[in-house]
Amino acid sequence: MARERINSVTAEEYVWRIRIRCSSHLDGWIKDCFSGLTITHQENGSTLLRGELMDMAAFYGLMMGLRDTGIMLLSLQAERIERHIGSGMDITTEEEIQDEKQKSSSIGKRR
């Protein structure tokens, strides 16, 4: 049975790269709530949460978890990143793909 395609890309072909900035340093207990995310305390007193989520359900789950903890958000970025399995590029942005193509093309010209 063929898997239904959404906007010509299946769920396995992309992830959501997120970056969230919170207004204060978060305590250690928060790591249990947001496992899988990198948590970095910034010098200005804010906290940066970064990571990749497999689908929109995980993204919405994270948003509800942030809401439930009462954490004040300063910024939120979510970007759908295509997964290039078997091409030597794991997860990249469109800009990174173009850079790779440019590098490959310049290497070919030197030969």
Image (cartoon, grey):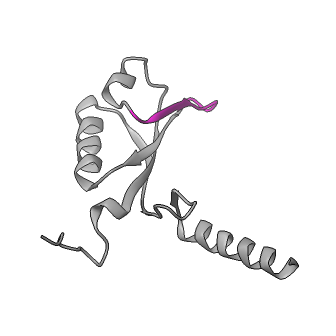
To which quarter of the image does residue 32 belong? top left
At a point 43% along the width and 50% down the height, the residue shown is: 18
Give how far across and how far down residue 23 sits, in percent.
Answer: 46, 35
The segment highlighted magenta reads 36-45
Q: Is residue 76 visible?
A: no
Give how far across and how far down residue 66 sits, in percent.
Answer: 30, 37
To which quarter of the image does residue 40 belong? top right
At a point 29% along the width and 32% down the height, the residue shown is: 70
Main SS of the magenta part reads loop
Give how far across and how far down residue 69 sits, in percent.
Answer: 27, 29
Give how far across and how far down residue 47 sits, in percent.
Answer: 50, 33
Q: Residue furthest top?
A: 28
Is 47 left or right of 107, judged from the image as shown? left
At a point 38% along the width and 61% down the height, the residue shown is: 14
Q: Is residue 1 visible?
A: yes
To which quarter of the image does residue 73 belong? top left
Q: Residue furthest left?
A: 1
In the image, residue 44 sits, relative to residue 3, either above or below, namely: above
Asked whether 41 falls inside the magenta stretch, the response is yes
In the image, residue 39 sits, relative to residue 80, either above or below, namely: above
Q: Residue furthest right?
A: 110
